[in-house]
Image: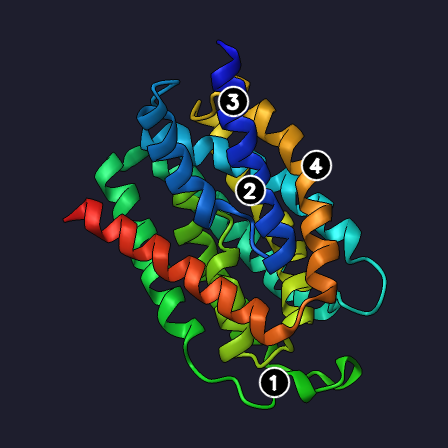
Amino acid sequence: MDLAFIVTIFLIGFIGSYLSGLLGIGGSIIKYPMLLYIPPILGVATFTAHEVSGISAVQVFFATIGGVWAYRKGGYLNKTLIIYMGASILIGSFIGGYGSKLMSEGGINLVYGILALIAAVMMFIPKKGLDDIPFDQVTFNKWVAATLALVVGVAAGIVGAAGAFLLVPIMLTVLRIPTKMTIASSLAITLISSIGATVGKVTTGQVDYYPAFIMVIASLIASPLGAMAGKKMNTKVLQMILALLILATAVKIWVDIF
């Protein structure tokens, strides 16, 4: 493997992990298409959809550790939300991660495209008054949260994405959780989810360990930097960045599917 390969994979991991910490996502929403398309364009490597989803699953685990650590103080982490959604998404992501071995590459890309499209639509739904709710007064339906997390876990486990790019719109739009609490808590839930997805991918031999290791190093550097920037940024700006990011990815995946 040459220097161009190492630099390319590192930069993909760094960019995705910075956005992970900034926006409360695992980063696969951006890293999946980047890993699939950029290395072949540059002539440094070509990964299959199974390899990309396996690398993403492992990398997401380490990216979310860095993000959660940066958000550990200040009341950003809603422990009840994390427990209910985390337990459900862990079960679902393991089922999806293990079952993805039985799917075609076209099937994996189709699942990813559907998830991204749903998430994009939800992000553009108005969220008036959401960030006026004090952190200590946040309430939500625990069983609705758990059920939605289970469904997201199964689907996201298939693409090794941990599901945060869909969890964030659900937490903002359906559960009405303030933006910065959503970002911090979704990182913790994604950390739990990524355990199931990673175990599923590793046990079925879907992980290419060398590029995964490079992306893990990038994650541990970039994710805390993104989280620190996210704490200082206006919540409307954060929501808009995430909405545009998910929309762009959805468009790209669907163009390729068709």
Q: Quadrant of residue 48?
A: top left
For residue 220, which numbered disc appears in the image? Answer: 4
Identify the secondary structure beneath mark 2.
helix
The mark tally for this picture is 4
Among numbered discs 4 and 1, the one appearing first in the sequence: 1
Q: Amino acid at mark 1?
A: Leu
Q: Amino acid at mark 3?
A: Pro
Q: Residues within 10 Å of mark 1 (few under 14, many from 20)?
A: some
**Which residue is drawn at the image coordinates 47% and 54% (left, top)?**
153
Res. 155 visible in picture? yes
Among numbered discs 2 and 4, the one appearing first in the sequence: 2
Identify the secondary structure beneath mark 3.
helix
Position of residue 178 measured from the top left corner of the image (x, y, whole percent): 65, 78
Q: Amino acid at mark 4?
A: Leu
Among numbered discs 3 and 2, the one appearing first in the sequence: 2
Residue, disc 2: 15
Residue, disc 3: 211
Q: Does the CB distance between marks 3 and 4 fall below 8 Å?
A: no
**Which residue is drawn at the image coordinates 33% and 34% (left, top)?**
37
Q: Compute the Cα span from label 2 to label 4.
A: 12 Å
Position of residue 90 measured from the top left corner of the image (x, y, whole percent): 56, 51
Q: Compute the Cα span from label 3 to label 4.
A: 15 Å
Position of residue 57 measured from the top left corner of the image (x, y, whole percent): 51, 38
Q: Does the CB distance between marks 1 and 3 fall below 8 Å?
A: no
**Which residue is drawn at the image coordinates 68% and 55% (left, top)?**
188
Residue, disc 1: 130
Among numbered discs 3 and 4, the one appearing first in the sequence: 3
**Which residue is drawn at the image coordinates 74% and 65% (left, top)?**
232
**Mark whose residue sits in front, 2 or 4:** 2
